[in-house]
Amino acid sequence: MLKKTLPKLVIHFLSFISRLPFWALYILSDILYVVLYYVIKYRRKVVQENLKNSFPEKSPEERSAIEKAYFKYLADLIMEIIKSITISEKELKRRVIVTNPELLQSYFAQGKSVIAVSGHYCNWEFAALNFCFNDDKKFLIVYKPLSNQSFDDLFVMIRSRFGGIPVPMNQTMRKMVQLKNEQTVSVLVGDQTPVKGDTNYFTTFLNQPTAVFLGIEKLAVLMDDVVAFYDMKRVARGYYSYTLVPLIDEAKKTAPYEITEAHVRHLEGMITKEPQYWLWSHRRWKYKPESVKPLTSAAY
């Protein structure tokens, strides 16, 4: 009984918190940073190991500075995601700006659908919500379902608030095929860790052999969709811009793994420039090449 009731109580509390103005949320964020970093030391060893392996050329002092900046941003990100529960369309449009909306219009004019790729970088949730303001086309927001049903329902509600269509990862292909005669934008996060059974391709990412999710490439080739990356930048606290960067215009003409390498390399460049905005507390490198089955042509 408690397992079912507690998450609902937490969600009601978060909904209350989300109604606070941003300045109040950032005061809470400053407190949360101290709790995460100094009190409970949330996944600090994971973050430190990830930074050490990703930036061996940096000094311990430089990596420590990135670590602290990351935890400060993580606290802000948590508060901003909570704010997503009640943020208004007007407020979101004011805080998240797309620099080149004409690119989407150009693709739509050509009769094309778009796969928009991001990473767990900056506030990817804000960007996904903001996409829905760019046109009256269907915007599919692909997500990995959470194990707790109450919290999963909460995120589904958030992602659908402005017309987005949340789609569980394992239903993405079915949904895209269902809408093949309509123009769509499918928003996917490209740095998800694949499940062990789907760990068929490794590339070097941030100086490490990294298992890469191939779903984006498979979907793009199947649907012959344009692939673009939404390159997000933090302009100020609580304010972002993103630019749509074309990666692939003709997916069916690409070589195997060309699409995957394109979005992985773009994300890597973003992280290298401003590393504090990536999700370093994620256990991204839990699979090693020797721990999974060899790559075969059938795996692609």
Image (cartoon, helix red, strand yellow):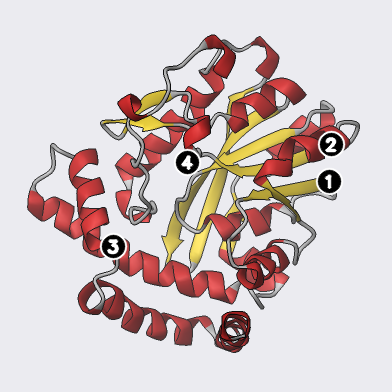
Mark with earlier residue (1, 2): 1
The residue tagged 1 is 137
On the image, the x and y values in percent for residue 216 come to 61, 32
Graded by Cα atoms within 10 Å as few (under 14), some (14 to 19) or many (20 or more), the crowding at tag 4 reads many
Q: How far apart are marks 4 and 3 (CA)?
A: 19 Å
Is disc 3 in contact with disc 2, using a CB cutoff of under 8 Å?
Answer: no
Comparing 232 with 125, the one in front is 125
Label 1 – label 3 distance at C-alpha: 40 Å
Q: Earlier in the sequence, mark 2 or mark 4?
A: 2
Asked if the residues shown at circle 4 and circle 3 are in contact, with their CB atoms under 8 angstroms apart, the answer is: no
Apparent side of residue 177 relative to residue 273 in the rendered image (left or right): right
- The label shown at residue 183 is 2
- Left or right of 126? Residue 103 is right
**Residue type at tag 4:** Asp
Ranked by sequence position, the earlier of labels 1 and 3 is 3
Which residue bears the numbered disc 4? Answer: 191
